[in-house]
Amino acid sequence: KQALNIVKLKKMKAEGVPLSMLTAYDYPSAALAEEAGVDVILVGDSLGNVVLGYNSTLPVTIDDMVYHTRSVARGAEHTFIVADMPFMTYHGSIDVTLGHVRRLIQEGHAHAVKMEGGLEICPAVSAIVSAGVPVLGHIGLTPQSVNTIGGYRVQGKDPEDAVRLMREAKALEQAGAFGIVLELVTEEVAEAISRELSIPTIGIGAGRYCDGQVLVFHDILKYTSSYREKRFVKTYADVGGVIKDAIGQYVQDVKQRAFPEERHVFGADEEVLHTLYGA
Ligand code: KIV
Ligand code: NA
């Protein structure tokens, strides 16, 4: 199977073929996503929340992203992989920004990077695209700016907000982004942006009319110890419950000496007994 590329992604939009994106953070999650037919894997900085146990994405470092992207790339060699640029790694000089991009591509083996923000990041987007690296934009609720946004709330509810989002989306397309993630955006605004742009929009909590959808691996699988319902997520399995039950059975088996059984053990030759215990 041949990996997708940004030319094919834009063609999918033109042909009205929906694009499926899912996050992954390590070798097994990436391999399973690829085998299940995901179009694009996102190594999201949601890594911080769902894998590293932080309560926001702010503590995630470029080293964290490189390390996890590399393991995802080993698991999904035939899938287009986008890696998130973490907090504050693309707001300084272009040289420093390009250094971080280089690491995600060269050491992490990502095909593209994703960056949160609007007009203020457009110069960086242009520079990265000029360097030959595809960029996925990300507007709406941008978790790296949670402290200036004032919480995780839906964007595009009033006219000014709608106009701002549309302006940001157009600017990112102009700057050379190959697509834009719309996070927690009202369905009407996401639909208007999707119609206006020729590059695909990929929604998360952004309604039915985006060109693609993205969700977090651990969310669709309830792969966590305490899953909190989110309105925009559809859950397809209770992996957390399956894991907890299985581990509980293992612990019980060990306590009751029900494991290991004879079929799990290795026997030695009879003369070993003599050596150990004498004649
Ligand atoms: O980090 C992430 O998982 C993301 C998606 C929610 C788009 O940025
Ligand atoms: Na992210």
Image (cartoon, rainbow, N blue to C red):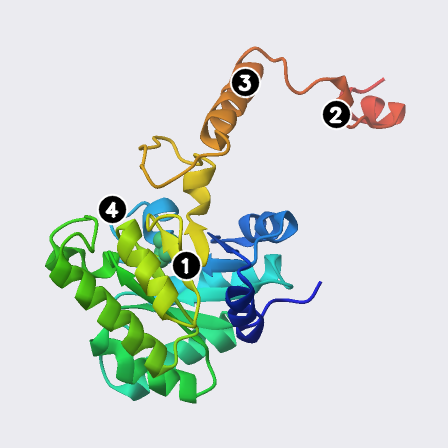
Q: Return the residue at label 1.
A: 202
Q: Nearer the viewer, mark 4 or mark 3?
A: 4
> Which amino acid lies under the numbered mark 4 shown in the image of this protein?
Asn
State whether label 4 is within 8 Å of ligand 1. Answer: no
Q: Label 3 to label 2, Cα distance in Å?
A: 19 Å
Which corner quadrant of the image does residue 128 belong to? bottom left
| Residue depicted at 84% across the width and 22% down the height | 274
Which residue is under mark 3?
249
* Rendering quarter of residue 122: bottom left
Q: How many marks?
A: 4
- Report the residue marked by disc 4: 55
- Residue 43 in the image, given as x and y percentages of width and height: 44, 59
The amino acid type found where label 3 is placed reads: Gln
Image depth: mark 1 or mark 4 in front: 1
Let me know if residue 88 appears in the view.
no
Crowd tier of the residue under label 3, counting other residues whose Cα lies within 10 Å: few below 14, some 14–19, many 20 or above: few
Q: Where residue 222 appears, x then y in whole percent?
A: 43, 34
Mark 2 residue type? Val
Q: Measure how far apart labels 4 and 2 are at the Cα level.
A: 43 Å
- Give the mark, 4 or 3, whose residue is nearer the N terminus: 4
Per the image, the residue denoted by label 2 is: 265
Mark 1: C-beta under 8 Å from nearest atom of ligand 1: yes
Name the residue type under label 1. Answer: Ile
Task: Give the alpha-carbon distance from disc 1 to disc 4, as whole Å.
Answer: 24 Å
Q: What element carries label 1?
A: strand
